[in-house]
Amino acid sequence: MESLRLPLPQSPEYARTLGSLGIALRSGSETGLAWQIQSRRLPVLGPVDLLSRGPVARDPADLYPALARCRRPGVPLLLNADGIGAEALRAGGFWPLMTPATLALLPLGPEDTMRAAMHQKWRNTLNRSARQGLTLSRQSLSGTHWLLEAEARQASARRYRALPPGLIAAFARANPGKALIWEARHRGSPVAAIAVLRHGRMASWQIGVTLDEGRRRGAMNALLWEAMRWLAGHGHDQLDLGMLNSDDAPGLTRFKLRSGASAHRLGGTWLHMGALAPLARHLPAGLAA
């Protein structure tokens, strides 16, 4: 399991976080294969199992067969798929609920390789930021850091949903040293900060807030670059920059992709439920794309 690249919802760190909040996960693993499932109670449906970005397999051919071992008889399975094709899910009796989202995944490695992957404009902004009088620092996340409150205000103002700041703080408590903040200050005042959660080979950008002064000075480029270098030097080979939304946040989408990240399309949200499974197998292929 340690050798697998586990996204945040499939990581032991996430399981410890939920466990600290009294939320249990059901997990399983075999050679080159792992999964963990959260159980919830939803209106109308009652008990439902949630499998988010799992299972994870070294060999992609093992992903779909593993779903049978993830399902419990009589309990609906809500799947946020990654790596399993729509045709296979439809044939297996999964009903499509939501179209696929797209993530930005940033490879980490030698500094010259990461720099070469950047878009020229992104790299130019990074170079300029070094001459803007910014002081950069790294620290473990605490529940009192200004970034958490600023993120909550930003999410409300821009009407987007992210991992709740309270859950991020719980992650920090349950996994000491694995929730980090990179902060930029100018003349002693904070102008930008990001929070990154570490989990095995991967890490996930969870929060990013920049004030007007930070935006003018390219602080976000500087912070992400500092995080990339540090994470690459501490055993991480991929940074998940989160969802891409070119319609509502085109600037943020450009920022992520120009950093050297690649767009990774997930498989959509699907439901396997006994009564619906026979119908799902006969859905037109266009409805399951």
Image: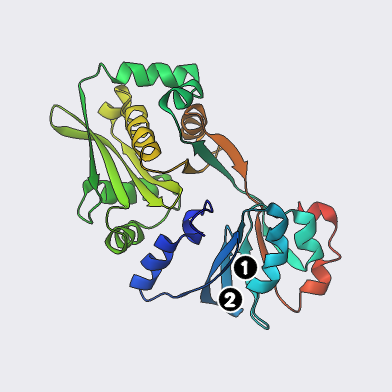
> Tag 1: residue type?
Leu
Q: Residue 245 sits in which quadrant?
A: top right
Give the percent coordinates (x, y) of residue 89.
75, 61
Q: Which residue is mark 1?
A: 78
Tell me: residue 91, above or below residue 4: below
Give the percent coordinates (x, y) of residue 280.
80, 67
Is there CB contact under 8 Å for labels 1 and 2?
Answer: yes
Q: Is residue 79 visible?
A: yes
Q: What mark, if any, has residue 276 been given in the picture? A: none
Q: Which residue is mark 2?
A: 48
| SS type, badge 1 | strand
Estimate how packed mark 1 is, as few (under 14), some (14 to 19) or many (20 or more) residues with alpha carbons within 10 Å: many
Q: Residue furthest front?
A: 31
Query: Who's the residue at 82% across and 64% down the image?
Result: 91
Query: Who's the residue at 60% across and 42% down the image?
Result: 264
In the foreground, 281 or 2: 2
Query: Who's the residue at 28% across and 44% down the image?
Result: 181
